[in-house]
Image: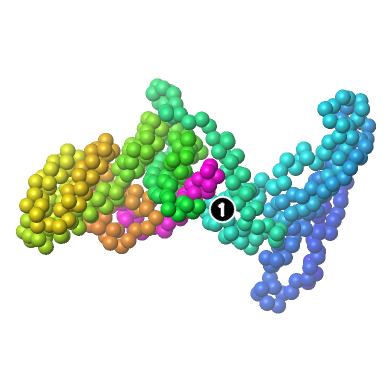
């Protein structure tokens, strides 16, 4: 089978047509791999079609610029050169003539290149977008390989060019970012009631981590990453949740609140819309999420608390080896402390920490790691005191729902033991609920307990933040 494809181009009036043979190839139909276009054939077709179409567009543009716009006199040719243009479907070269201005009007320069007004950049915007998008997900090298696998890109394109293009886009986006503000709550409360009913509710998870400096291996820098999810109610099952991510280097970024605000605005945040912030209570993260919305609820991530309590429980196991009865009693106090924190009972939790300090005094001489235990308990008290305004805002049922969901939504990986412990805590909590509430919370959290493949969240955000760090350095 002989296949011949032609490109037919007509003018705006439709009375002239130019027919150009684009590609001709032979196709067999005896085996399954012969059916349809192959990847190589599709690349050749796209590249050839792009070349003919671009050449026609450039020629048409140059024709409109070949005469004086004031008097219509044909302009004289002063010099010729070539201009390269990189697109998604190949790199192409065009004639770029330099024309002399007409003498009928005085101008600042004696000559000009018309093509410079059309090709303001040497790279097509779509190619820049694809390079930046892939580079934010994987390494520059893998981004280049992926694009070359499916697109007829120039084989001379290298990793340095992709990195340069990505950082150029990042600089432009940074320049377009608005000014930083301490407060992004807009309007008066009376105006918020007049806004249309919002669609869905926001959940924003924010956390920080330290990354090793690639240039100086002995030092690290802190990266703040976050994920904003706009989820819709049960009545809008047809709409899937919308996700946006952000990341920045805490010590270098001068507009962190503005960055978060722009992410929320891109998802359509209204001042009358519910938004839940989930974080570990760190000072930097607290300042970042405050004054962002009047309908905001700030919750403490249970994961960070349970890790500190797990350290205490390990110390408790050591106390059991010294004195079994008293050690088991202290472990039971730690378990009750955990239960108080789970229900947001901050005052009771602080009182139980004081009771723990009193109960541990007999081990000051017999337990070798007693100073470390005292230090861990003191750090837990400080942490709870600093985060008390986070943990005391919601009921125990809401805390159980959101805390479990946040661990699944926010952590890059979860072990089976951690899922099992959260499921056990949920089961114990359900025993204290009525039948109706028990069914309600089970329905809302059942899917959140199962492990979810969300490891790419931290990877994507970290990749963006790390590259932004190198850009700002």
- Asked whether residue 431 is in view, the answer is no
Pick the residue in front: 190 or 359.
Answer: 359
Height in image: 273 above or below 370? above
| Residue designated by label 1 | 135
On the image, the x and y values in percent for residue 79 come to 89, 42
- Residue drawn at x 91%, y 30% as measured from the top left: 102
Query: Would residue 315 be counted in the magenta stretch?
Result: no
- Residue drawn at x 82%, y 38% as measured from the top left: 114
Query: Would residue 470 be counted in the magenta stretch?
Result: yes
**Extreme residue toward the bottom, this view:** 30
- Asked whether residue 62 is in view, the answer is yes
Q: Is residue 212 left or right of residue 400?
A: right
Quarter in which the N terminus is drawn: bottom right
- Residue drawn at x 87%, y 24% as measured from the top left: 106
Height in image: 135 above or below 399? below
Task: Give the residues in magenta.
Answer: 445-473
């Amino acid at each position: 089978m002989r296949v011949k494809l032609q490109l037919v181009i007509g003018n705006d009036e439709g009375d002239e047509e130019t027919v150009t043979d684009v590609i001709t190839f032979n196709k067999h139909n005896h085996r399954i791999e012969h059916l349809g276009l192959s990847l190589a054939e599709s690349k050749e077709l796209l590249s050839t079609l792009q070349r003919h179409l671009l050449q026609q567009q450039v020629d048409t543009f140059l024709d409109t610029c070949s005469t004086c716009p004031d008097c219509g006199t044909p302009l004289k040719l002063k010099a010729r050169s070539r201009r390269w243009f990189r697109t998604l479907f190949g790199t192409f070269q065009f004639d770029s003539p330099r024309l002399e201005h007409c003498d009928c009007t005085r101008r600042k320069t004696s000559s000009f290149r018309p093509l410079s007004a059309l090709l303001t950049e040497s790279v097509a915007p779509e190619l820049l977008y694809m390079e930046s998008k892939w580079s934010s997900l994987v390494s520059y090298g893998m981004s280049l390989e992926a694009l070359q696998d499916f697109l007829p890109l120039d084989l001379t394109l290298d990793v340095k060019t992709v990195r340069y293009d990505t950082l150029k886009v990042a600089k432009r986006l940074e320049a377009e970012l608005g000014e930083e503000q301490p407060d992004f709550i807009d309007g008066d409360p009376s105006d918020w009631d007049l806004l249309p009913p919002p669609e869905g509710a926001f959940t924003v998870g924010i956390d920080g981590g330290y990354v090793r400096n690639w240039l100086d291996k002995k030092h690290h820098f802190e990266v703040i990453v976050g994920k904003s999810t706009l989820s819709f109610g049960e009545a809008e099952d047809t709409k899937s949740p919308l996700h946006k991510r952000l990341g920045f280097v805490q010590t270098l970024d001068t507009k962190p609140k503005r960055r978060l605000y722009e992410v929320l605005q891109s998802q359509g945040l209204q001042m009358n819309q519910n938004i839940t912030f989930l974080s570990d209570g760190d000072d930097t993260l607290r300042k970042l999420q405050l004054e962002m919305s009047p309908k905001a609820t700030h919750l403490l991530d249970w994961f960070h608390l349970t890790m500190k309590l797990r350290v205490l429980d390990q110390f408790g196991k050591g106390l059991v080896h010294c004195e079994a009865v008293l050690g088991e009693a202290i472990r039971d106090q730690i378990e009750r402390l955990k239960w108080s924190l789970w229900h947001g009972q901050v005052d009771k939790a602080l009182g139980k920490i004081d009771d723990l300090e009193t109960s541990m005094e007999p081990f000051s001489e017999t337990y070798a790691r007693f100073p470390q235990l005292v230090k861990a308990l003191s750090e837990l008290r400080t942490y709870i005191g600093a985060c008390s305004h986070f943990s005391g805002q919601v009921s125990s049922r809401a805390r159980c729902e959101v805390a479990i969901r946040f661990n699944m939504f926010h952590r890059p990986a979860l072990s089976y033991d951690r899922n099992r412990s959260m499921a056990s805590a949920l089961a114990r909590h359900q025993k204290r609920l009525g039948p109706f509430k028990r069914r309600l919370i089970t329905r809302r959290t059942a899917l959140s307990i199962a492990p979810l493949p969300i490891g790419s969240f931290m990877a994507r955000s970290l990749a963006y933040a790390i590259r932004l760090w190198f850009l700002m350095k």
